Image (cartoon, helix red, strand yellow):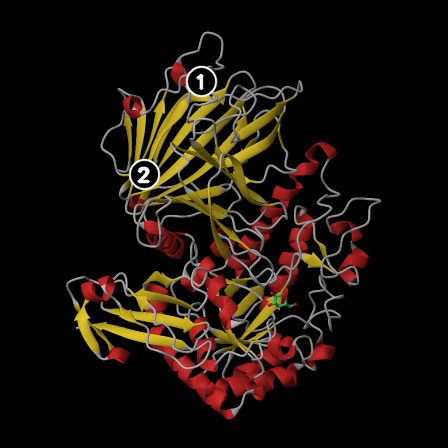
């Protein structure tokens, strides 16, 4: 089994796939980090680790070199007791003091994986997929207890971690840092990946070398955010898609997060990942406990391509849930970019009829069907169908769409309220706000206080009532602003800063109740596009609207960045109109289809405005989707040319699990006269098998296609796409 404890050296070795993670209990009880990387055979690695040496602080009588708190590589370091680097945990005691130094108490090796109280997390399909180590630590002076959980996967290079903090003392404690995990790496020789962005420009790839000092990726917005994804990778300087060591870190959480790397005076690197300590505090009365979100750690010895494929495998089978997890997703048409707020039932039915003719399978009615909602300044919160606007009841509309041959989906933005709404007029205290202080509006709206039970219950009751009232097959769950004046009228002053996390716990409770009440409904999350593309959302909803930017050329970067952690089948991607509504760019219709194939595939445009040629191409696009969908969803993704490194083109490929077929996709961003051809080398094929590249009419061994590669066939004009089908002989 993957977890072993060596009594002699008091070391734990976690063997996840072909990687190892080693820790050791030191004589005075600190749990030291020893190693994480490619598999090793030994338990006691202390002889290989450089002596910490130097001037040191240590507890009275404990000044052995190994125990120097400020240079100890430590599994869960506390603040205030001689370790001056970024802590994993700090706690303010009732007497106003703040020092934590956790020492080993006991450990247990548990079969399987325990659930996380109130939080989404990776799960197991069978007991033998993984086992879990729980190490209990305690600071006997302040009474803080921590149980560190490590779930170790037998077949994947994956370790998931979370921590349960509790108050074992007899006076209250207040947590300020309560990180999910701390990981120590023995050098600083890494580059660090940030998936940064903005609305309509999510998850751009940026690698920066680690500097001495601290560098952080974070959100303080109450959501995982457009601006920074709760994901990073630390990679060897020479690492690329196919080679080099890479360490991946991803947080299963949709709220404010912090990932911080600190390179210290000894050039070692500490990484902490968890809830953002900014404006966070959590009171623990004696006996109370706090569960951190889960961090998913992945090791790859073979570049970031392999790291991504490990995340994709794990998230496909051990994070996404429900009836839609493994199924082909319906080809939908969403009316947002077709009509915006201007629609009624007749307009939607017309769109459905046009869509049915070309093989589209579902109509999604976006924003504007409820309350008083003809623009974005009113109505949010009033989850009652506006029959006057539609011209009929929801059930009648759904029936008419069904008669046209399409399934029906609907849009909600449950967490929000417009001041101009009946809900706000009835319950002004239900939104996050500070008495006697102006409320900051975002898109004319406020955020409901989801920490409150009555607010949670209102949303569950309203959404369930709508979903029960008609045959609804799909829900788009949107949220369009961040948290400000984050204050709950229902929390006492000494628990005020708990609101950030209590909001998330309430939100997850609502999601659990609604998604489990409608197990057949396909849920897609959205946050002004991809503002909440994180693993926690994928636990409840197996796909996420990736960006409000539907421009195919911009999508190359957005989808490329997203694929670093998240599987293709979770990436919402639609064909939209040209000139594109976000960029004004004209892109060929087939290219728009080919880029949307790198995701759940659908449409978001007024079919009535297409010319005949484009209309006919929809059928070709849908044929292509039908032909390749299994390969794209079920195969392995290999990124070939990064649009961040090559401004003229991007390329990627999928290889089926049995290696019998592959699809290469390439989009030329810009052409130029006497164009210099770009050679691509394929990946993931069987070296010794013969493969036919259909469009090139070439049959060669996998090793030739991977080592020599070929030149991408020349295209005429900007923004053209090329698809190459590869079949094993
Ligand atoms: C957000 C979403 C869009 C659309 C609008 C509706 O911006 O990301 O897809 O649903 O809201 O208001």
468 above or below 80?
below
Q: Is residue 521 visible in the rendered structure shown here?
A: no
Residue at the outermost front position: 674
- How far apart marks 1 and 2 lie (CA) works out to 24 Å
List x then y, in percent, for residue 46.
Answer: 31, 23
Q: Which residue is mark 2?
A: 37
Residue at the outermost top position: 61
Per the image, label 2 sits on a secondary structure element best described as strand
Mark 1–mark 2 contact, CB under 8 Å? Answer: no
9 above or below 620?
above
| Circle number at residue 674 | none
| Along the viewing direction, whichever of 418 and 110 lies nearer the viewer | 418
List x then y, in percent, for residue 714.
Answer: 35, 78
Q: Is residue 326 left or right of residue 413?
A: left
Circle nearer the N terminus (1, 2): 2
Quadrant for ligand 1? Answer: bottom right
Q: Is residue 456 left or right of residue 140?
A: right
Q: Is residue 75 visible in the rendered structure shown here?
A: yes
261 above or below 302?
above
Quadrant of the snapshot with the C terminus: bottom left
| Label 1 beta carbon less than 8 Å to ligand 1 | no
20 above or below 662?
above
Q: Residue at x 82, y 49 (%)?
A: 438
Per the image, label 1 sits on a secondary structure element best described as loop
| Label 2 beta carbon less than 8 Å to ligand 1 | no
Q: Is residue 254 left or right of residue 590?
A: right
List x then y, in percent, for residue 318.
Answer: 39, 52
Q: Which residue is mark 1?
A: 68
List x then y, in percent, for residue 640.
Answer: 35, 62
Mark 2 Cα within 10 Å, few/some/many (few <14, many 20+)? many
């Amino acid at each position: 089994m993957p977890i072993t404890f060596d009594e002699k050296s008091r070391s734990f070795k976690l063997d996840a796939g072909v990687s190892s993670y080693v820790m050791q209990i030191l004589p005075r009880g600190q749990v030291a980090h020893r190693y994480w990387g490619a598999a090793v055979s030994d338990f006691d690695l202390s002889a290989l680790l450089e002596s910490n040496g130097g001037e040191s602080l240590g507890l009275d009588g404990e000044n052995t070199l190994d125990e120097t708190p400020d240079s100890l590589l430590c599994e869960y370091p506390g603040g205030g007791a001689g370790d001056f680097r970024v802590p994993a945990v700090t706690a303010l005691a009732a007497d106003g003091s703040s020092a934590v130094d956790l020492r080993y108490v006991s450990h247990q090796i548990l079969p399987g994986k325990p659930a996380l109280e109130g939080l989404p997390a990776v799960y197991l399909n069978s007991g033998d997929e993984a086992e879990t180590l729980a190490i209990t630590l305690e600071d006997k002076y302040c009474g803080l207890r921590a149980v560190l959980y490590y779930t170790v996967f037998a077949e994947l290079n994956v370790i998931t971690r979370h921590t349960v903090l509790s108050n074992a003392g007899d006076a209250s404690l207040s947590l300020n840092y309560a990180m999910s995990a701390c990981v120590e790496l023995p050098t600083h020789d890494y580059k660090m990946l940030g998936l940064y962005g903005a609305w309509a420009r999510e998850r751009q790839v940026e690698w920066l070398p680690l500097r001495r000092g601290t560098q952080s990726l974070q959100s303080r917005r109450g959501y995982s955010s457009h601006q920074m994804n709760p994901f990073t990778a630390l990679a060897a300087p020479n690492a690329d898609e196919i080679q080099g060591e890479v360490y991946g870190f991803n947080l299963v959480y949709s709220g404010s997060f912090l990932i911080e790397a600190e390179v210290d005076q000894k050039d070692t690197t500490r990484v902490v990942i968890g809830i953002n300590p900014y404006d966070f505090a959590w009171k623990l009365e004696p006996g109370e406990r706090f569960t951190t979100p889960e961090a998913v750690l992945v090791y790859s010895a073979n570049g970031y391509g392999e790291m991504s494929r490990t995340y994709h495998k794990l998230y496909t089978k051990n994070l996404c849930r429900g009836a839609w997890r493994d199924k082909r997703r319906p080809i939908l048409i969403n009316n947002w970019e077709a009509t915006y707020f201007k629609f009624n039932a007749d307009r939607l039915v017309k769109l459905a009829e046009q869509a049915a003719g070309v093989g589209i399978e579902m109509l999604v009615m976006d924003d504007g069907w409820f309350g008083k909602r003809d623009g974005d300044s009113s109505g949010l919160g009033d989850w009652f169908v506006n029959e006057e606007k539609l011209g009929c009841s929801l059930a009648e509309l759904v029936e008419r769409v069904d008669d046209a041959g399409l399934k029906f989906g609907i849009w909600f933005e449950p967490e929000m309220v417009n001041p101009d709404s009946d809900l706000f007029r009835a319950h002004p205290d239900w939104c996050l706000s500070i008495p006697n202080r102006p409320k900051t509006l975002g898109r004319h709206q406020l955020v409901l206080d989801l920490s409150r039970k009555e607010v949670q219950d209102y949303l569950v009751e309203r959404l369930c009532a709508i979903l029960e009232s008609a045959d609804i097959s799909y829900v788009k769950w949107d949220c369009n602003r961040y948290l400000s004046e984050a204050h709950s009228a229902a929390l006492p002053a000494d628990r005020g800063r708990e609101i950030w996390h209590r909001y998330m716990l309430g939100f997850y409770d609502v999601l659990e109740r609604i998604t489990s009440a409608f197990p057949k409904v396909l849920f897609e999350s959205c946050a002004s596009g991809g503002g909440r593309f994180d693993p926690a959302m994928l636990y409840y909803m197996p796909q996420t609207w990736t960006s409000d930017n539907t421009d195919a050329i911009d999508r190359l970067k957005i989808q490329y960045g997203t694929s670093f952690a998240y599987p293709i089948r979770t990436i919402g991607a639609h064909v939209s109109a040209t000139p594109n509504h976000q960029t004004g760019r004209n892109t060929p219709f087939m290219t728009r289809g080919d880029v949307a194939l790198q995701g759940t595939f659908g449409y978001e445009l007024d079919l009535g405005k297409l010319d005949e040629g484009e209309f006919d191409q929809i059928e070709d696009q849908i044929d292509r989707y039908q032909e390749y969908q299994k390969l794209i969803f079920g195969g392995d993704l290999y990124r070939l040319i990064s649009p961040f490194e090559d401004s003229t083109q991007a390329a990627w490929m999928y290889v089926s699990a049995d290696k019998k077929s592959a699809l290469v996709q390439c989009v030329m961003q810009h052409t130029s006269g006497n164009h210099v051809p770009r050679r691509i080398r394929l990946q993931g094929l069987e070296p010794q098998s013969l493969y036919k590249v259909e469009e090139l009419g070439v049959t060669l061994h996998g090793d030739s296609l991977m080592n020599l590669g070929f030149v991408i066939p020349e295209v005429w004009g900007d923004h053209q796409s090329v698809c190459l089908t590869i079949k094993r002989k």
